[in-house]
Amino acid sequence: GNSVTQMEGPVTLSEEAFLTINCTYTATGYPSLFWYVQYPGEGLQLLLKATKADDKGSNKGFEATYRKETTSFHLEKGSVQVSDSAVYFCALSANTGNQFYFGTGTSLTVIP
Amino acid sequence: DTAVSQTPKYLVTQMGNDKSIKCEQNLGHDTMYWYKQDSKKFLKIMFSYNNKELIINETVPNRFSPKSPDKAHLNLHINSLELGDSAVYFCASSQKSGGWTEAFFGQGTRLTVV
């Protein structure tokens, strides 16, 4: 079956620290992979995506690389800002299905 | 111009009442979804519609009934509301073109049952 596992939070970092949020997946077929961000009181917004192995998605200083050999899609940012405080969700969509599978979300708080 | 809009944003109601949440997307997508997000932020698929046809109906009480009058709209009606229904409900849409595009989400409806 299809599933996503991401690291538990909450994560608290100081401004300008390096961020990694781990995400691994199980999927049938060839999934597309996504990172979504949810700011307080808002809906989910797409942060970045990758549709095939070795693709790197990037946006707003965040990056993630689709690693088929390790079934991973870890999210990284070199220097976080207070405005990055949010909940981050890793997700996949599989060609065989009609839904998106989400990880449990990782809450990030960045302190000045 | 909002891509996926749902109304209302907040809904406070008493146990036993019946309520509806409406969702509309102007992206021309064929597939729409309802997700429930609990207090721990966990997202659970409830329903998925493709071109007005029900595709996914997860283990959801039959008090929840989705209705898709056309492919741009997917409404959620809830009968006999219970305290445990309190959550944030998200509507989303996506399109299959080769693989799946990303899902676009509405702002959510925070339902509080008292």
Image (cartoon, coloured by chain):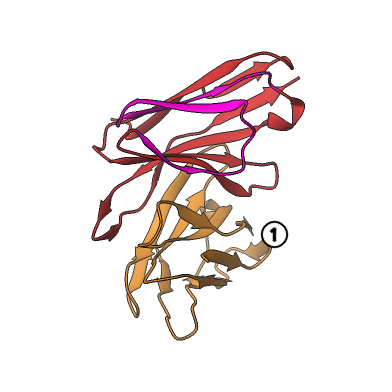
Chain colours: A orange, B red
Q: Is residue A90 above or below residue B42?
A: below
Whole-percent x, y for residue B84 in the image: 74, 32
Does the segment drawn in magenta span residue B58?
A: yes
Residue that label 1 marks: A10
Q: Is residue A20 above or below residue A84?
A: below
Q: Residue furthest bottom?
A: A69
A109 lies left or right of A55: right
Whole-percent x, y for residue B105 in the image: 42, 41
The residue nearer to you, when weighing A31 against A48, is A31
Magenta stretch prevailing secondary structure = strand
For label 1, the SS is: loop
Does the segment drawn in magenta span residue A15?
A: no
Whole-percent x, y for residue B61 in the image: 64, 33
Specify the amino acid type for callout 1. Pro
First to last magenta residue range? B53-81
Q: Is residue A54 above or below residue B8?
A: below
Q: Disc 1 is attached to a residue of which chain?
A: A
Tell me which residue sits at (53%, 66%) in the image.
A1
The N terminus of chain B: image quadrant: top left
The residue nearer to you, when weighing A19 against B59, is B59
The residue nearer to you, when weighing A112 against B25, is B25
The residue nearer to you, when weighing A111 against B4, is B4
In the picture, residue A82 is in which quadrant? bottom right
Residues packed near mark 1 inside 10 Å, few (<14), some (14 to 19) or many (20 plus): few
Instruction: Say if residue B43 shows up in the picture.
Output: yes
Tell me which residue sits at (23%, 37%) in the image.
B28
Tell me which residue sits at (35%, 78%) in the image.
A53
